Image (cartoon, grey):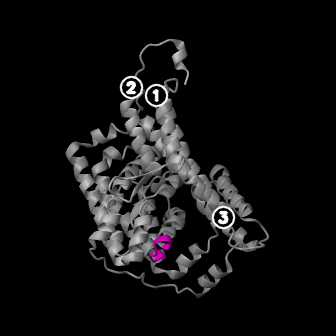
Amino acid sequence: MTQAPPPPVPAPHPTAALPPQRKLLLGAQHAIAMFGSTVLVPILVGLPPSLALFGAGIATLIFHALSGWRVPIFLGSSFAFIAPTALVVKEMGPAAAAGGLIAAGLLYVLFSGLVRLFGTERILQLFPPIVTGPVIMVIGLSLSNVAVKQAGTSVVEHAALGSWGVALITLLAAVIASVFGRGIFQMIPILVGIVVGYLTALLTGNVDPQALSHLRSAAWLGLPPFHAPELNWQAVALIAPVAVVTFIEHIGDVVVNGRVVGQDFLKNPGLSRTLLADGIANMSSAVLGGPAATTYAENTGVLALTRVYDPAIIRIAAVFAIAFGFSPKLAALLASLPPSVLGGVSILLFGMIASVGIRTLAEAQIDFAHSRNLIVVSLILVLGLGGAAFKLPGSQQELSGMALAALVGIVANLLLPAQRPETDASSDRV
């Protein structure tokens, strides 16, 4: 199996020379990109969205501080914890859920210690390009269904323009800004797409009237409804084991972020350090009463599209998220964005992530004449995208999606021989 060459360093925009107002726009773009998913999770599990926004901002700043200020990753509400958190909130209350999420963060700290003890190199040997490439593709393509559903979702009946029309206008505006834009417009294509899409939705009657009414009545300032966690061992048993799954997801997210930026973040600042940062960041959100925080693919997609990799931009986005948490008015403005607008930009963002996976395989010069390489990639793609799920032994938690795909890919890559024995030409056929 051909090993990957060092990842090429893309040519980023010279962000250091950008004026403050441009950096603010770039930070706002990241904050808006993560908004939909970050507020969806608390809505599904029964927690306050404003608290999730505030917790995401705090978690992101803590992650950056503990990981050496060099990894341009945003932390938002984790989807992996939805099922157990919703159950605990319903049966035992939000405080018990917060205690379980803190325990999950402590498991991250334990994993960090184990990585430091056994060495990052041993972990990295499990993730060669033949595994990471298709796993990155799964990260992007598994979200594609979300983007398409959003694009086709209408919140208003008998609008002058269908939801897909709004989504396509949003997508087209983002593409034009990225490809043909100059200066700041080329750097904020997602923000351009959202503004154009939102104005289109307003003019064609695609914005929910109730959302607009709530926007008009919302206060400009207000404290999120913080609440203290409590220790409930039953809640811990239900929620904490999910950290085993998100541990694999963490590696995948850090890998794809590094591939986009052109740096190996698993080596510098190091996997043990990013795991520690992620765990403590998750606990910081849970201590406030918010949902679990995790690294976000949406913002990695923005990085890939804009080629602006300055971690300080992500920290500006974190400050915006905190401001959204303290301002019901700003949160209501973002909440009034029609799903079709979010779907339009998500089509582009998630596709960019999948493209990074294809680039990873191409740069590693993987030989697909070898059937073992075809098998490894096929297993990862089909199981990761096909909805396969397996329950963990002795637990109600499921291994599915990217975590399942990565685990199967790792095992297949280890078990299948790297070099085929010499056979006749007919054996080359798959």
Q: Amino acid at mark 2?
A: Pro
Residue at coordinates 42% horizontally, 49% vertically from top-left?
Answer: 403
Residue to which mark 1 is pinned: 372
The local secondary structure at tag 2 comes to loop
CA gap, disc 1 and disc 2: 7 Å
Residue to which mark 2 is pinned: 417
Q: Position of residue 58 (x, y in %)?
A: 37, 69
Do the residues under discs 1 and 2 have CB atoms within 8 angstroms? yes
Please report the bounds of the magenta region as a residue range.
Answer: 43-49
Residue to which mark 3 is pinned: 340
Disc on the earlier residue, 2 or 3: 3
Q: Position of residue 56 (x, y in %)?
A: 42, 68
CA gap, disc 3 and disc 1: 41 Å
Residue at coordinates 41% horizontally, 32% vertically from top-left?
Answer: 5
Alpha-carbon neighbours of circle 2 within 10 Å: few (<14), some, or many (≥20)? Answer: few
Seen in the picture, residue 409 relative to 114 is either above or below; the reply is above
The verdict on residue 47 being magenta is yes
Which quadrant of the figure has residue 152? bottom right
Q: Position of residue 55 (x, y in %)?
A: 39, 71
